[in-house]
Image (tube, rainbow, N blue to C red):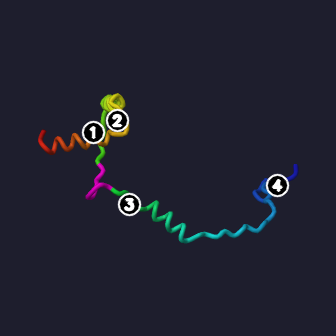
Amino acid sequence: MAKKETGLKSTLSLGPKFQVPQTTVDIEKTELATKKIHAPVSRKEGKWFRVTTDLPEDEYIRFKTKLIQEGRVRKGQDVVRELIAQYLDGQ
């Protein structure tokens, strides 16, 4: 039985070589895009901190359901901030 050519060199065939076209990069445009991407998010005032909490699934579902029923789909953050403000004010 003859020896089979199973090495990488015999199993791959590369396409012909061709010159890769040179591209020009507009440095100013790139810098502006980079600054826009990395610009800080503007907040109303002062420094902001992220607060996370874990909720049981049933409480979370009830919370989201109530927000949807009230038409406040994206306002969960506002509800939590209102509760924190009420707690701080002693109500």
Local crowd size for mark 4, using a 10 Å CA cut-off: few (<14), some (14–19), many (≥20) = few
Mark 4 vs mark 2, foreground winner is 2
Q: Which is nearer the eye, 9 or 20?
A: 20
Q: Which residue is mark 3?
A: 40
Q: Which residue is mark 1?
A: 79
Left or right: where does residue 3 sit relative to residue 81? right
Magenta segment, which residues?
43-50
The dot on residue 72 is 2
For the residue marked with disc 3, what is the amino acid?
Answer: Pro
Whole-number angstrom distance, CA of label 3 to CA of label 2: 27 Å
Q: Which residue is mark 4?
A: 5
Is residue 5 covered in magenta?
A: no
Contact? badges 2 and 1 (CB < 8 Å) = yes
Task: Point out the image quarter for the C terminus.
Answer: top left
Q: Position of residue 57 (x, y in %)?
A: 34, 31
Q: What secondary structure is found at the residue carrying circle 4?
A: loop
Q: What residue sits 25% from the left and 43% below the top?
A: 81
Q: What residue sits 49% from the left and 66% below the top?
A: 32
Query: Residue 60 sits in which quadrant?
Result: top left
Question: Can you say whether 28 is above or below 43 in the image?
Answer: below
For the residue marked with disc 4, what is the amino acid?
Answer: Glu
Left or right: where does residue 80 sit relative to residue 61? left
Sequence-wise, which precedes: disc 4 or disc 3?
Answer: 4
Whole-number angstrom distance, CA of label 4 to CA of label 3: 59 Å
Q: What secondary structure is found at the residue carrying circle 1?
A: helix
Q: What residue sits 29% from the left and 42% below the top?
A: 78
For the residue marked with disc 1, what is the amino acid?
Answer: Val
Query: Residue 63 sits in which quadrant?
Result: top left
